Image (cartoon, rainbow, N blue to C red):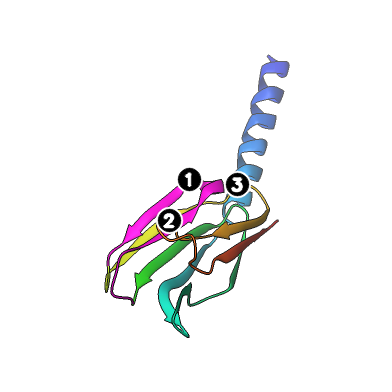
Amino acid sequence: MKRVLAVAVVAVAGALVLAGCAGNHKTEKFQISATSVNGASAFNVGTITVTEGDKVDLRLGNSTDKAHGFSIDAFGIHKVIQAGQFQTVSFTPNKTGQFKIYCQLHPAHVPAQMIVVG
């Protein structure tokens, strides 16, 4: 009986510790738009930096006159944003590193990057 009680106490303590860790995460919000820079298609940001485990909300926009893509392969994100439109995509990065943000519709589109820190 003492052993069962000890195991239960350890399990509850572990759950409380994990619950406390989960409370440290936040939501990071960014807006990224496809735009024209000196006649070339590009994103309005070069680099965004986020934290592994935090929820990321990206508001994707397109200020050009044709559809543009928005992809981050490492996180399975592949969106098409119509001219003058916005979409929001949310995800939680589960690995650190540098990840290319690119337009899958136009290879010449100047890419951006996302850095995920631990």
Which corner quadrant holds the C terminus?
bottom right
Mark 3, secondary structure of its residue: loop
> In whole angstroms, how far apart are the C-alphas of marks 2 and 3?
13 Å
Q: Nearer the viewer, mark 3 or mark 1?
A: 1
Give 70 or 93, whichever is nearer the viewer: 70
Give 9 or 39, whichever is nearer the viewer: 39
* Residue 75 on the magenta segment: yes
Question: From which residue to which does the magenta span run?
Answer: 64-82
Which corner quadrant holds the N terminus?
top right
Q: Is residue 9 visible?
A: yes
Q: Upstream in the sequence, badge 1 or badge 2?
A: 1
Mark 2 crowd level (few <14, some 14–19, many ≥20, 10 Å Cα):
some
Q: Which disc, if any, is residue 94?
A: 3
Give 60 or 50, whichever is nearer the viewer: 60
Residue 13: % across, % down: 66, 38
Residue at 43%, 59% in the rendered image: 70
Q: Is 8 placed above or below 93 here?
A: above
Q: Which disc, if any, is residue 76?
A: 1
Q: Is residue 25 visible?
A: no
Mark 2, secondary structure of its residue: strand
Q: Which disc, if any, is residue 90?
A: 2
Tell me the amino acid under the disc marked 3. Answer: Asn
